[in-house]
Image: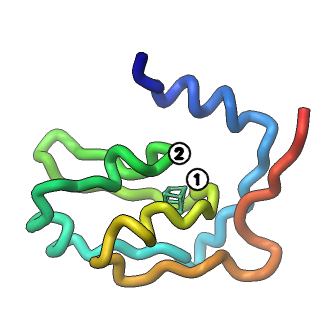
Amino acid sequence: MSIQKEDIDHLLNLDKIKADEKNAHIVIDPDQCAACQAKPCLIVCPALLYTLDETGALNFDYAGCLECGTCRTICPHLKKWEYPRHTFGIYYRQG
Ligand code: SF4
């Protein structure tokens, strides 16, 4: 059984994310991504934020990041990975 984007959205529905639109806390390197054959980010991100467009190019949207750090661990080519600035990022809630 594979997890679909709709399932992830439902599971995260209780959490709140305040995206820092002026400062991306994760930045990919498009040239490195294009050269990467494995693209493990497509599999490991629990929020499914790494996707491929119709041309096969990697898309990434940091705004839904759960701050788990998995992509930082798996990818040596990220230009930047840091926690969001104070007051930004995810606020985990319990149901
Ligand atoms: S830190 Fe975790 S949730 Fe955020 S983009 Fe990386 S793998 Fe996805």
Asked if the residues shown at circle 2 and circle 1 are in contact, with their CB atoms under 8 angstroms apart, the answer is yes
Q: Secondary structure at mark 2?
A: loop
Label 2, ligand 1: CB separation under 8 Å? yes
Tell me, for residue 47, which label it has, or none: 2
Label 1, ligand 1: CB separation under 8 Å? yes
The reply, left or right, for residue 55 in relation to residue 82 is: left
Residue 73: image location, x then y, percent = 43, 70
Please, is residue 55 above or below residue 20 in the view? above
Q: Secondary structure at mark 1?
A: helix
Which residue corresponds to mark 1?
A: 64
Please, is residue 38 above or below residue 51 in the view? below
The answer to which of marks 2 and 1 sits earlier in the sequence is 2
Q: Amino acid at mark 2?
A: Ala
Tag nearer the camera, 2 or 1: 2
Residue 61: image location, x then y, percent = 45, 57
22 or 7: nearer the eye? 7
